[in-house]
Image: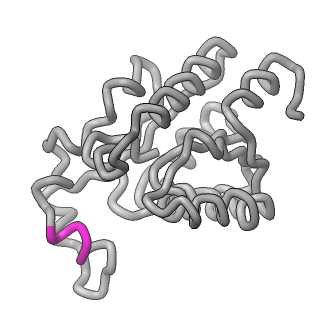
Amino acid sequence: MDYQNGIVEMLGEPDDLLARAADAIATVRRAGVHVGYVRVAFDDADFEAIPPTSRMGARVGTSAQAFHNDSPATAVHDRVAPEPGDIVVRKVRVGAFSTTDLDARLRERGIDTLILAGISTSGVVLSTVRDASDRDYRVLVLADAAADREPDIHAFLTQRIFPRQADVITVAELERLLSGGGTS
C-alpha cells in the first residue's frame, strides 16, 4: 500500500524495502495468491471535496500537484508495479477501505486473508490493519516490507500494537507459510 513514487522517495534509502516488497509480491504470485495495490491520489473533484477540518487535506493541499491522480508521483513504483489482473484501487484517505471499493472487490474473489505491506506503518498500514480486522479478515503484516519515517514507531506498532489484530511476520516467513511450512 502506498508504494508510489512520491511516498517511496520520502524514505531516503528505499532500496532494501523495495527489494523485500518485490520478493513478497513474487512469492505470493508463485503461490497463486491475488495481489492488490492501494495508492493515494486525488482528482480535481476530490481536492474540492476535502473539508477544511481534514488534517489529511491540510497535508495534501500543500503539495496538491504531487498528489494529483495524473502525477508521476502517485504511480506505483516500477520495482513493485501492478500486473494485468491485479486489484488496484485509488484512495483519498489514509486507510485502504473507507474511500474505495476494495472490500467488495476482495469479497467477490472470496478473499478472507490479507497480507499487508506499505508506507507508512503509522498511516496506511495501521489504518488498514484496524479496518480489515473490524471487517473480519485474517490479517498478516509483513514487518520488513513496511516502513515508517520514524523507525521507533514502526517497531512499536509491529511489535506491540499489530499483534492484537494481526499476525506480524517477515517476508522469509511468508515464503514458508505459503509453501505449507508455517512460520517460526
Residue 158 in the figure: left or right of residue 13: right
Residue 137 in the figure: left or right of residue 129: right
Query: Can the viewer see residue 127?
Result: yes
The x, y position of residue 2, in whole percent, is: 40, 47
* Front one among 110 and 137: 137
Task: Name the residue located 48 percent from the left edge and 26 percent from the top edge.
Answer: 19
The x, y position of residue 61, in whole percent, is: 17, 70
Task: Name the residue located 32 percent from the left edge and 35 percent from the top edge.
Answer: 76
State yes or no: residue 61 in magenta: yes
State yes or no: residue 1 in magenta: no
Q: Give the range drawn in magenta.
A: 58-62
Count of numbered badges drawn on the protein: 0
Q: Looking at the picture, does residue 81 appear above or below residue 49?
A: above
Q: Quadrant of residue 23?
A: top right
* Front one among 83 and 108: 83
Task: Name the residue located 48 percent from the left edge and 63 percent from the top edge.
Answer: 150
Q: Residue furthest bottom?
A: 53
The x, y position of residue 71, in whole percent, is: 14, 44
Residue 113 in the figure: left or right of residue 83: right
Q: Looking at the picture, does residue 121 appear above or below residue 181?
A: below
Query: Can the viewer see residue 98?
Result: no
Q: Is the magenta stretch mostly helix, strand or loop?
A: helix
Q: Which residue lies furthest to the top in this view?
A: 30
Q: Looking at the picture, does residue 63 appear above or below residue 91?
A: below
* Front one among 29 and 34: 29
- Quarter containing the C terminus: top right
Please name the colour scheme applied to the rendered image.
one colour
